[in-house]
Image (spheres, rainbow, N blue to C red):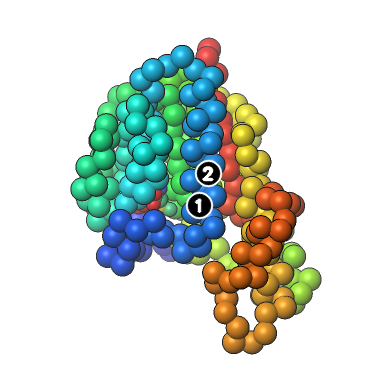
Amino acid sequence: MVNDTYIKNHYKRIAESYGENGLSTIKDQVIRDAEMIFFVDQIKDILNQSKNENPTLLDIGCGNGFLLKTISENFPSIKLTGLEFTPELFTIAQERKLPNCVVYNGDAREPLPFEEQFDLIVTERTIINLLSWKQQALAFQNIYKHLRPGGFYLMSESFKESWTLMNMARKEFLLDEIPISKHNVYLSESGIKSMKKIGFEEIQGVHPSNYLSTHFYVTRVLHPAIRPDGAKVTHTQFAKFFNQALPVGIGNYSPIQFRVFQKPLS
Ligand SMILES: C[S@@+](CC[C@H](N)C(=O)[O-])C[C@H]1O[C@@H](n2cnc3c(N)ncnc32)[C@H](O)[C@@H]1O
């Protein structure tokens, strides 16, 4: 059974191999770039509609601080807070010394080391690191508690339903199932229903939740189906061509989804 030590050892190795690099925790540059587009565009849209001149944001599971750095560069007025579980990644994020940013070593499932409520909370593939629904629900309750009424929760997290669909598409070409890695438990639509019971309202984001679907179909279904043995697998011209030729968000083949929630005002 995978436990906290496994998660910490996994990310310790990542901290040692990647340091501050943007490819820390995700090797696919297209996914990382899309995540940055989602967070930056969604935050811009929220701030444009608010009169708040001193917005605050909490990144839970901030890793090496790459997302915090991107947000800091795009929104210098946001007061940033990071929370990170793995000591080695926490140290890297803290040593970036981002302006207007404090980073804490802590656990999303436990009472957080501060009382503050935030205008925005973000998670980037962090909830799926909590290895049961019970633990994921504790994190969602924490997120809800630390959002101010009217505040927004932005997630880039993976879902079982779209992972299943991607593997059904692979099966049509007799390709093996892509397994879920041991350090992840994917969310499901029933989990979203439970989030709504906590009080979250899901809202339409500026980008569709299935933004990465085209990329996943091209790189995880189409390309492996026709790729000759021994040919290049990642960062291919094939993927580059189809990602430019096709619109984003076709179908529901990306396990990773971009979703936006709000805590009601009352
Ligand atoms: C996919 S990474 C996040 C990447 C990060 N946003 C970035 O910019 O690189 C998920 C992070 O969640 C952290 N994490 C795992 N379990 C956690 C927990 N219980 N509480 C807080 N963070 C946790 C991991 O250590 C890891 O850094």
Residue 141 seen anywhere in this rendered image of the structure: no
Q: Nearer the viewer, residue 257 or 32?
A: 32
Residue at x-position 68% and y-position 50%? 248
Residue at x-position 28% and y-position 53%? 89
Residue 10 seen anywhere in this rendered image of the structure: yes
Task: Name the residue that disc number 1 marks.
Answer: 33
Q: Nearer the viewer, residue 174 or 56?
A: 56
Q: Quadrant of the N terminus?
A: bottom left
Q: Is residue 100 shown above or below 211?
A: above
Q: Is residue 92 shown above or below 105?
A: below
Identity, as a three-letter code, of the amino acid under mark 2:
Ile
Q: Is residue 96 shown above or below 227?
A: above
Q: Is residue 108 left or right of residue 152?
A: left
Identity, as a three-letter code, of the amino acid under mark 1:
Asp
What crowding class fits label 1: few (fewer than 14 Cα within 10 Å), some (14-19), or many (20 or more)? few
Q: Is mark 1 within 8 Å of ligand 1?
A: no
**Residue 85 location, x and y as percent?**
31, 48
Among the 4 quarters of the image, the one containing residue 230: bottom right
**Residue 71 location, x and y as percent?**
40, 38
Give the CA separation, mark 2 to mark 1: 6 Å
Q: Label 1 near label 2: C-beta < 8 Å?
A: yes
Residue at x-position 49% and y-position 17%? 50
**Residue farthest to the bottom?**
229
Task: Name the residue that disc number 2 marks.
Answer: 37
